[in-house]
């Protein structure tokens, strides 16, 4: 076994590999870029080497620097994690040239699977079933079109060099073919510098089911069951689970043996994943093979009780596979939810920011959090915005799903928008509970996931109002108890008056609708024997024509409520003035609209004048010196294919624009100098 390895990666996967190495008594070397000086993986490793500037191509993708770091520290092997250099044959070759063991498959296997077209040719020869389609070398537009016409629409255009869902286009009719081909090629050239296309029959509502395989250097190969990764947005995985619901033992065996055949066709070594599309009639088709550890490997670990990173290290050190096929057993059910800094309401646009508050659910044998960040770290524009992976396990799918929802409701992140509420709503939706899985799940069940229906909003509003009023009361009680003069009326910030019915008023913005809510405290005498708790308070909540009686109390961030006779518990997280209310039915976000006190300062919105992410300046909308009103558009930039408008934080004028149309800007830089009007 190795005594020291280098991990050519960052974030959660670097931390994940370090944990196993440490358990096995192997020393670890981390590498890091400028942006990652304070990153968790750097402090977890025994040694760490700075390898360059923040952009990946200058650090994590810079082969000579990574190799140099390994040589300099005396590491004997390199674990590439996933992404970055993990499927890069040139990197693998550089390791070999420098007598470093690459913890992964042989160069030839990476090369064989590097092109989706070439991979399909190899798999076709090995009798692995393929999605019907064309993956030939003749790329003449007319020929491609003839193949699409012959197989019948819809078809899917795919970039041969593709990955991450880029360079893919669905084509629903012959008339739409030419435009879709141009668009897919353009995207492919931009992303991969290559525009070779393949065409597949587009399967309507298949499932993405993949098999984890492992091969050693001694002719042993096993499969470790399957994962269902059908829950996707923009063809990217969001929630994965193992085993795949409804997959029988015989189908598992058939898919597993096919996956091994695929791996053996390229003389595979180490951990690999063979991805299949599973049709509703039980037929399955090879899609591609990923020649590395997958992001979602933990769900396989949870149901098999194995440590796949340990397996990788053992195979790379020329040991035998730890188990034979008959030793591998499935126990229970596991889910993984990928927690991202992104805005689901805005087409899942990635966001950046500082993790000003981070509190993860309690980890135990049911709940595992694979994360590479700490409170105070930045989710920057440079890398993937995944914050963590939440993994849960229990003895069956229903119980595991309950754990997933609970753990999601306990996750607290402040400083940026995340997809936690979206994940909660997806996980708690009826079709997901019923395992009605297919790759179109999110679009199909949009209404149930986004809970913007009138009914959903109205159910949550009284609970949100109750939370606000109870929290205010609690704050008042706390202030009073911690004051020198505990009886001072100035501490009664809740505005309640003894023996007097009093109305509280809140403007609550819930799911983009504003509600004026009046809350009246009802005398406690009516409720001598409180059913719901010791310090139960009772209210009449009115909005529009609706009047609801509610009562409850708060312990920690748990609200125990009774609304119209229905008793339930909810939890509420707050970040940056935004509340997320998690009930059994769904998670919704709300804010309280504060009265405008005319107190605007430029410091209140200091981030308003910086580029939100890397992008290009499109247009300057005012001239230096022009007087502009608060909120007036000043500059338009494009980032991640979306336009962003930068607005004046207060009335004032732009004294200087630092960039001109066409200029490239880095995320976080100041775009202009602004002078607020003197008040
Ligand atoms: P990438 O490598 O870019 O991630 P994949 O080939 O792995 O692309 O496909 C990504 C996803 O696209 C799949 O998980 C599936 O949801 C969908 N997909 C791919 N091929 C087909 C197809 N022929 N029919 C229907 N959906 C497909």
Image: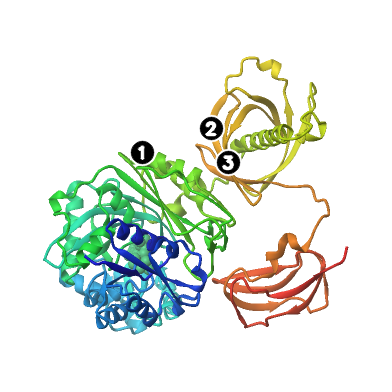
Q: Mark 1 points at which residue?
A: 398
Taking the image as drawn, is residue 208 in sight?
no
Q: Mark 2 points at which residue?
A: 569
Element type at marker 2? strand
Q: Is residue 48 left or right of residue 413?
A: left
What residue appears at the point 46 percent right and 40 percent down from the top-left corner? 406
Ligand 1 shows up in which quadrant of the image?
bottom left
Q: Mark 3 points at which residue?
A: 572
Q: Confirm or deny contact between disc 2 and disc 1 (CB under 8 A).
A: no
| Image location of residue 259, percent across then percent down | 20, 61
Q: Is residue 388 left or right of residue 207?
A: right
The N terminus: image quadrant: bottom left
What residue appears at the point 17 percent right and 62 percent down from the top-left corner? 260
Taking the image as drawn, is residue 25 in sight?
yes
Out of 616 and 531, give the one closest to the viewer.
Answer: 531
What residue appears at the point 19 percent right and 66 percent down from the top-left corner? 262
Residue 468's place in the image compared with 529, above or below, is below
């Amino acid at each position: 076994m190795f005594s020291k390895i280098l991990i050519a990666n960052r974030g959660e996967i670097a931390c994940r590999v370090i944990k196993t190495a440490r358990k096995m008594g192997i020393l670890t070397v981390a590498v890091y870029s400028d942006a990652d000086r304070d990153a968790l993986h750097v402090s977890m490793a025994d040694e760490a080497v700075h390898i360059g500037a923040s952009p990946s191509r200058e650090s994590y993708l810079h082969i000579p620097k990574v190799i140099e770091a390994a040589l300099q520290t005396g590491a004997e092997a390199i674990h590439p994690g996933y992404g970055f250099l993990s499927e890069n044959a040139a990197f693998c070759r550089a390791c070999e040239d420098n007598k470093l063991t690459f913890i992964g498959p042989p160069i030839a296997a990476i090369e064989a699977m590097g092109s989706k077209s070439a991979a399909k040719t190899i798999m076709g020869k090995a009798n692995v079933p393929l999605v019907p389609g064309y993956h030939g070398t003749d790329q003449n537009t007319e020929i491609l079109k003839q193949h699409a016409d012959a197989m019948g629409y819809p078809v899917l255009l795919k970039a041969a060099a593709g990955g991450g869902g880029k360079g893919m286009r669905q084509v629903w009719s012959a008339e739409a073919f030419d435009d879709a081909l141009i668009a897919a090629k353009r995207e492919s050239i931009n992303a991969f510098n290559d525009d070779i296309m393949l065409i597949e029959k587009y399967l309507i509502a298949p499932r993405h089911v993949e098999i984890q395989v492992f091969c050693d250097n001694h002719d042993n190969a096993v499969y470790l069951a399957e994962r269902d990764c059908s829950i996707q947005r923009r063809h990217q995985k969001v929630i994965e689970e193992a085993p795949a619901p409804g997959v029988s033992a015989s189908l598992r065996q058939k898919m597993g043996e096919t996956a091994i055949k695929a791996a053996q066709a390229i003389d595979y070594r180490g951990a690999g994943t063979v991805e299949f599309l599973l049709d509703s009639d039980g037929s399955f088709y090879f899609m591609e093979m990923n020649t590395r550890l997958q992001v979602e490997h933990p769900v396989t670990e949870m149901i098999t009780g194995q440590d796949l990173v340990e397996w990788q290290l053992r195979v790379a050190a020329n040991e035998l596979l730890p188990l034979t096929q008959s030793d591998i057993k499935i126990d229970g059910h596991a889910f993984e939810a990928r927690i991202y800094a992104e805005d689901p309401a805005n087409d899942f646009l990635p966001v950046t920011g500082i993790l000003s508050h981070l509190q993860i659910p309690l980890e135990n044998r049911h709940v595992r959090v694979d994360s590479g960040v700490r409170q105070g770290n930045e989710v920057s524009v440079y890398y993937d915005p995944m914050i963590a992976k939440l993994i849960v396990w229990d003895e069956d799918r229903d119980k595991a799903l309950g754990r997933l929802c609970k753990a999601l409701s306990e996750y607290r992140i402040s400083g940026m928008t995340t997809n936690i509420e979206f994940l909660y709503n997806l996980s708690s939706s009826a079709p997901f509970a019923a395992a009605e899985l297919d790759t179109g799940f999110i679009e199909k069940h949009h209404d149930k996931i986004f809970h913007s229906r009138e009914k959903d909003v109205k159910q949550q509003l009284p609970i949100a109002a109750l939370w606000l009023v109870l929290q205010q009361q609690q704050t008042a009680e706390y202030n009073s108890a911690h004051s020198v003069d505990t009886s001072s009326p100035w501490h009664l910030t809740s505005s309640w008056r003894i023996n007097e019915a009093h109305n509280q008023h809140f403007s609550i913005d819930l799911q983009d609708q504003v509600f004026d809510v009046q809350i009246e405290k009802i005398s406690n005498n009516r409720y001598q024997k409180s059913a719901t708790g010791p310090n139960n308070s009772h209210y009449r909540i009115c909005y529009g024509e609706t009047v609801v009686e509610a009562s409850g109390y708060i312990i920690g961030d748990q609200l125990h409520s009774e609304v119209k006779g229905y008793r339930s518990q909810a939890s509420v997280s707050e970040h940056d003035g935004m509340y997320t209310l998690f009930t059994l039915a769904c998670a919704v976000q709300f804010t309280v609209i504060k009265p405008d006190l005319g107190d605007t300062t430029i410091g209140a919105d200091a981030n308003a004048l910086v580029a939100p992410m890397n992008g290009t300046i499109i247009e300057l909308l005012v001239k230096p010196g022009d007087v502009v009103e608060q909120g007036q558009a000043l500059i338009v930039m494009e980032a991640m294919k979306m336009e962003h408008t930068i607005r004046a934080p207060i009335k004032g004028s732009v004294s200087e624009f630092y960039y001109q149309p066409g200029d490239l800007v880095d995320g976080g830089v100041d775009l202009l100098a602004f002078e607020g009007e003197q008040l």
